[in-house]
Amino acid sequence: MHSYFADKRRKMVSTLEQLRKFTVVVADTGDFNAIEEYKPQDATTNPSLILAAAKMPAYEPLVDQAIKYGTAKGGSEEEQVTNIMDKLFVSFGLEILKKIPGRVSTEVDARLSFDKDGMVARARRLISLYEEAGVGKERILIKLSSTWEGIQAGRELEENYGIHCNMTLLFSFAQAVACAEAKVTLISPFVGRILDWYKENTAQKSFEPHEDPGVVSVTKIYNYYKKFGYSTVVMGASFRNTGEVKALAGCDLLTISPGLLAELSQDHSEVKPSLTQQGAKTCDLEKVHLDEKGFRWLHNEDRMAVEKLSDGIRKFAVDSVKLETMIKEKMLNVKNGQ
């Protein structure tokens, strides 16, 4: 009788709750309501998520407040728009931080992806805006594209300024190795976008979770980091289904969209850790060192990663331009007293 009730109780624990025992669950959204509902440890944002949230009537006051701030600072229209964008990203981050115990990730403009000094300057600017609002840099992760320049910007920010970085748009093993060697805080390998590429470019259109190319990629990176004792942690991102999430149980962190968090909270199947530090130690992997030439060659050998990195930068840049256009229209309305 006792075991019947124990089994029944176990069945009632959601997959999401089970997952939290092995992995830090992060919400991938700019929507505060979703964050309140799923109570994640951390949250991540990006230009596309901020654009989607900024269009919602509920968040209009944040946009208006950022416009007021940017126009008051003066300068050319371009400088005002840049200041408004920075303020808007930080305003969303500040609201999110009221609802989570951990850290928020705020992204540097993707159009700076090949400009190391530009990324460093913009990251420091974002951190100074958080500090002006009374939030210390230990609660912020600055998101940078995982280009060679982005990774070196991450190295400089961590080493010289104690600013923690989240390296995003990561698709290749070369990117992961370079990030570990740069001693950045965290990487975000994109599971679902890797799957998308394989479905579009190969004959195979469906994969079991453990054979999913995105899952295989993140598993290898996790095992490599743990086997060789790197301090950088792995946060799987960009999931297409709950099968991918469950197949990466045990990963340091997983950032999950509200839609998939909802599915996981309704699911009651058993979850066991697929990734473990002990398992990683026994993996047959060799340590690699990459200088810039080595990185560029090894990354270039991975067609999927080359295409998805450039595509990801373009898409984030497009959404940044859309957000800027929206801001310029609102600035014009303010000027015209509408």
Image (cartoon, grey):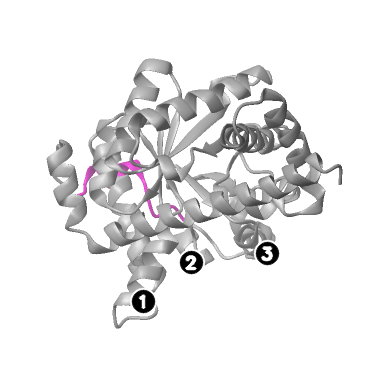
Report x, y in % for residue 152.
30, 31
Q: Is residue 29 visible?
A: no
Depth order, front residue of 253/7: 253
Report x, y in % for residue 294.
13, 43
> Was residue 74 drawn as part of the magenta stretch in this picture?
no
Assign the N terminus to one quadrant of the image: bottom right
Q: Amino acid at mark 2?
A: Gly
Residue found 65% across the figure and 18% down from its top = 132
- Quarter of the image for residue 39 reads top right
Q: For the magenta stretch, what is the residue range?
A: 272-283
Depth order, front residue of 290/319: 319
Residue at numbered disc 2: 243
Q: Is residue 34 left or right of residue 192?
A: right
Comparing marks 2 and 1, which lies closer to the viewer?
1
Q: Residues within 10 Å of mark 3 (few under 14, many from 20)?
A: some
Q: Is residue 71 left or right of residue 118?
A: right
Q: CA distance from mark 1 to mark 3?
A: 30 Å
Q: Which mark is residue 200?
A: 1
Residue at numbered disc 3: 266
Residue found 50% across the figure and 66% down from its top = 240
Report x, y in % for residue 285.
17, 47
The reply to whether the C-beta atoms of the residues labelled 2 and 1 are less than 8 Å apart is no
- Residue extending furthest right? 338
